[in-house]
Amino acid sequence: MKVRKTIKEWEMETGIKIKHPTGFGKSNNKNYTWKYTEEQFRRRARKSFIVCKTEKALEFLKG
């Protein structure tokens, strides 16, 4: 079973901060309540405006 987490939960785990969620579709509050798998979050974060706070964040995005 794949683990699903909200954007905020993924941000805390990976060290990535989503500044503008363009890769997640419409920019609204539902983006922050929906849950995403790790693969979905990685794919959508790459298409969004993000800030990588740690080296761990860069490693996460590399896959």
Image (cartoon, rainbow, N blue to C red):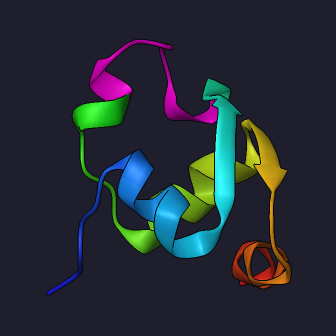
Residue at the image position 74 percent from the left and 52 percent from the top? 46
- Residue at left 80%, top 62%? 53
- Residue 20 x, y percent position in the rendering: 68, 25
Pinpoint residue 41: horizontal percent, then vertical percent: 50, 58
- Establish if 6 lies above or below 20: below
Residue at the (65%, 25%) spot, across then down: 22
Magenta segment boundaries in residue numbering: 23-31
- 31 displayed left or right of 58: left
Q: Is 47 included in the stretch rendered in magenta?
A: no
Q: Quadrant of the N terminus?
A: bottom left
Given residues 40 and 49, the one toward you in this image is 49
Quadrant in which the C terminus is drawn: bottom right
Above or below 34: residue 11: below
- Answer with the quarter of the image where residue 21 lies: top right
Residue 63 as seen in the image, left or right of residue 28: right
Q: Nearer the viewer, residue 40 or 5?
A: 5
Q: How many marks?
A: 0
Residue closest to the far left:
1
Q: Is residue 8 above or below residue 11?
A: above
- Figure check: 33 above or below 11: above
- Measured as percent of width and height from the top left, residue 3 is found at 23, 77
Q: Is residue 51 left or right of residue 43?
A: right
Q: Looking at the picture, how far across and down is residue 60, in whole percent? A: 69, 79
